[in-house]
Amino acid sequence: MANVNKDALVSVIATKTDLSKKAVEGVIESFEEIITDEIRKGNKVTLTGFGTFKVSQRAAREGINPQTKAKIQIPAMTVPKFTAGKALKEAVK
């Protein structure tokens, strides 16, 4: 199993679409920026069939430091979350 990084993704999309790598890279960077901005505002971004990007809240909880075994308090935080859509789930099965 190979990992696909941003450069490899740009190359594959450029080949499939006959666009320049520079243009594809610009589109991907804009996509990342827009998704980030929207979920930062608390909005959900849904790509039908692919999935949904949203923000999730994690409650504060108590944890254990594995080195010292001391109990520590882990604060509440907001985290990004991606939920795969039906078409993506079916494609991976």
Image: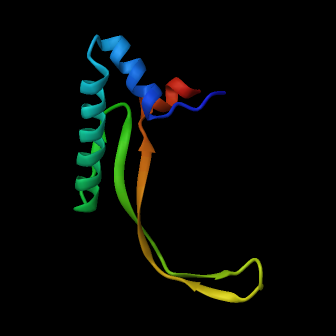
Q: Position of residue 60 (x, y in %)?
A: 50, 81
Which residue lies at the image location 77% right of the left edge and 85% below the top edge?
68
Residue 36 on image: x %, y %? 29, 53
> 88 or 30: nearer the eye?
30
Relative placement, left or right, of 49 versus 59 is left
Where the N terminus falls, by quadrant?
top right
62 vs 11, left or right, is: right
Q: Quadrant of residue 81?
A: bottom left
Does residue 23 sit above or below 47 in this rendering?
A: above
x 73%, y 89%: residue: 70
Place of residue 41 in the rendered image (x, y in percent of width and height, measured from the top left): 22, 62
Which of 58 and 26 lies nearest the eye of the viewer?
A: 26
**Closest to the observer: 80 or 89?**
80
Determine which quarter of the picture holds residue 54.
bottom left
Question: At x 45% / y 78%, what residue is drawn?
Answer: 76
Q: Which residue is at the far front?
A: 22
Q: Quadrant of residue 67?
A: bottom right
Q: Nearer the viewer, residue 7 or 50?
A: 7
Q: Quadrant of the C terminus?
A: top right
How many numbered discs, if any? 0
Residue 73 versus residue 76 in the image, above or below: below
* Residue in view at x 27 percent, y 61 percent: 40
The structure's colour scheme is rainbow
Q: Position of residue 35 (x, y in %)?
A: 28, 47
In this rendering, position of residue 77 left or right of residue 43: right
